[in-house]
Image (cartoon, rainbow, N blue to C red):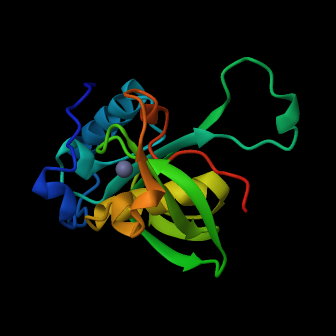
Amino acid sequence: MAVRRIVYSNEPMLHEPSRRVRRVDAHLEELIEDMIETMRAADGIGLAAIQVGVPERVVIVEVPVLRDDEADVSEEPPETELHVLINPEIVEASEELTEGIEGCLSIPGWVGEVDRYTEVTVEALGREGRPVRIHAEGLLARVFQHEVDHCEGVLFIDHIEDPERIWSVEEGQEEAVEAAQERPSD
Ligand code: ZN
């Protein structure tokens, strides 16, 4: 496994659609392992293959598991769930939108407010090549939308028309989140 270089938004490839994966093979597994290592090294919660320079429709997402007893969470690191999605597609989406703050490992130093569907259903192939269908809400739904956008060559800043909804943060502050935290709806 290896940490790969992250592609930044000034590089044209990040604005182009990625191609569909044809074969789930050892080469793809190596890419997935490197993506996981790269995402974790950067403290991200999601990564698309194009962000390590591979224009194929592969995304990974790793977010904290939501628990009912969230108020009681102790200091130990939160449990996370890892999703590996090959050729992901959003097949259903709620009418309702939620505003939230997002960052992107490819746009260091910047975050912005983006409206996303509150709930989505994603269909894809899983890591072993078998079809999966996942219903997601909250942060997981937001990160899925952010990462599927990468497969289309779309960045979160492309959704922001009002310049007041994007701002710079201290170096390192945005890295905690590739697609950041939910805010209480207001
Ligand atoms: Zn991103």
Give the farthest residue toward the top.
75
Give the farthest residue toward the bottom.
95
Quarter holding residue 136: bottom right
Q: Determine whether 118 is above or below 126 in the image.
A: below
Between 24 and 110, the residue placed more toward the observer is 110
Location of residue 36 in the rendering, given as x and y in whole percent from the top left corner: 38, 34
Counting the numbered discs, the total is: 0
Relative placement, left or right, of 34 versus 60 is left
Q: Residue at x 82, y 37 (%)?
A: 70
The N terminus - image quarter: top left
Between 39 and 86, the residue placed more toward the observer is 39
Location of residue 8 in the rendering, given as x and y in whole percent from the top left corner: 21, 44
The C terminus - image quarter: bottom right
Give the farthest residue toward the front.
164
Q: Residue at x 15, y 50 (%)?
A: 10
Determine if residue 127 is in view: no
Q: Residue at x 33, y 54 (%)?
A: 58
Between 133 and 172, the residue placed more toward the observer is 172
Determine if residue 173 is in view: yes
Location of residue 37 in the rendering, given as x and y in whole percent from the top left corner: 36, 28
Relative placement, left or right, of 128 versus 80 is left
Q: Determine whether 117 is above or below 129 in the image.
A: below
Location of residue 106 in the rendering, given as x and y in whole percent from the top left corner: 29, 44
Between 39 and 89, the residue placed more toward the observer is 39
Q: Determine whether 165 is above or below 95 in the image.
A: above
